[in-house]
Amino acid sequence: RLTAGIAAFMLLLSGCSGREGSIDMDESGADWEDTEIPPGTGMRFTAFAGMNGDYDLEDNLAMKVAMQNASILIDFRSVLNADLKEKRSLSLTSGNYPDLFFKAMFETVDLEKYGKQGIFIPLEDLIREYAPNLTAQLDEMDGWDYLKSSDGHIYSFPEIDRPSPAGSVCWINQKWMENLGLAEPKRFEELYQVLKAFRDQDANGNGDPDDEIPMSLAGSVYPLLAYADYGYDAATRTAAIDGELVYLPTDRRFREFIRYAARLYQEGLLDRNTFMQQRKQLEAVGRSGDILGAFDCQGAFEVVGRGRNDYIALTPFQEGTYPIKKGITVGAAVITDRCKHPEALVAWLDQFYDEEGGILAWMGVEGETYRINEDGSWGWITDKEYGEDVSTVRAGSTIQGTQYHPSIQPDRWADLSGEQDPDEVYLTQQHFKIVSMGEVPLPVMKYSEEEGGEIVALSTDMNAYIDRYVIQVVTGELDLDESWEGYLEVLQGMGVDRLIAIYRRAYEAAVK
């Protein structure tokens, strides 16, 4: 059937003629040239895109179907994820850029920068007129403000998912707790006692009481802040407490959190490598044996490998404070001023924002990449030409992947069969447990261009200083009580009062 977006596209197509440019992109990513439109093609556009691993969109089954739906051809030039930001930037600064950036991972600061330069076109009016599916979704979610830049314009299409944890999740070894007869901790002091038992009581049961690592985190202790009795917003380092916006790094609550983290570290409950290791190092530890009691990541299998459901996501300690994301991520696709018919691309992209289009983007094509089972669940097809394993099918034949993609997560996604992909189903269940107890910590806060510049100028060095101070206190290099006042004085000298004032003005305007 024709979705609302595709129907709109076909109407537009009937009234448009001429040609859009296609591209010839050299290794630098900076050379774009026109070529002829093949016979029978309604319109042709050019696009820069991030790859799904080693797979690009040129030969992608779901993308081919999406283009065939509207008799459109998009000439994709895809780049590896490791090269994405560099080649994306080179394309824009050289002036040789395409009609469309797709899965190019633009952040808000990028959208505002190139939007104000006129390179990225405003989309809000085009979406309301030519994207009925996306318009309906944003109306229902009250989501328009999440897409708006400080100048009031929308410069990108979003990925719309279910609400999810706002940051890295803490996972804890349920098997170890069962071995020791322990209940899941429900407050910070209980977590301390559980980690202490992991350290002292041979939790993995191998006869060696010294090979357990009670907790190991990837570079920071901040994932534990999600469990505090206030909703911590990592982007601003603030929390709304009793109707007032509190900048936590200068607050007594933050001081007590540092004290707790220092207690864990100095008693051997927090891995000594925590501040030195990145995600890859933590993953190496997790795969080296049954030695991890707790750690942080999105899904436990990322660290300890698949098929290890002995870890559970640590349940929030109270209702309504665990920080979650609404599920709207900007930067999934942008249209540039090179596009001669942006209304046509808007209408084409809109197909991914209803259930049918979401299924195409996330799952591919029924009978080719997935099948519906008798019990109503669905599973991946790995015995056809599109891949012999789930990872290959997903990377090569659906539009999802490492980068955000313009789409809505379909309701059908929740019916994935646990027999074929039990880790994905288990992850969904564990995330749902957290999300059901969480809350988006702050309203959408908008800043003027001048305020945005001040935030960047003030927070860059300030955040680095705060993080360094936390590490020094936690590791015992500094005494918390003796150094706290001096730490606050340094922050005042760095302009923290001005930063707080900007955040509070934006917060108060948002809640009016």
Image: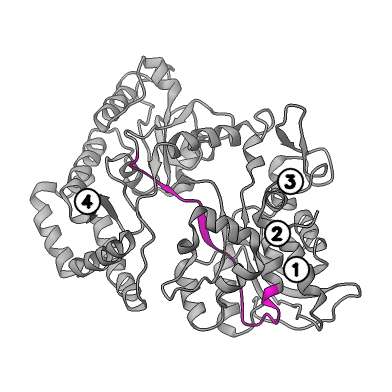
Asked if the magenta segment contains residue 43, the reply would be no
Q: Is residue 306 above or below residue 350?
A: above
Q: Position of residue 476 (x, y in %)?
A: 19, 45
**Quarter residue 420 falls in:** top right
Q: Write the start and end of the magenta stretch as one range.
A: 320-343
- The three-letter amino acid code for the residue at tag 1 is Phe
Give the secondary structure at mark 2: helix
Considering depth in this image, is 381 or 120 the residue closer to the camera? 120
Q: Is residue 207 above or below residue 44?
A: above
**Residue 393 numbered tag:** 3
**Residue 9 numbered tag:** 1
Q: Is residue 48 above or below residue 437?
A: below
Label 2 sits on residue:
351
**Do labels 1 and 2 touch, CB within 8 Å?**
yes
Closer mark to the observer between disc 1 and disc 3:
1
Give the secondary structure at mark 3: helix
Closer mark to the observer between disc 3 and disc 2:
2
Q: Is residue 277 above or below residue 101?
A: above
- The three-letter amino acid code for the residue at tag 3 is Val
Label 4 sits on residue:
472
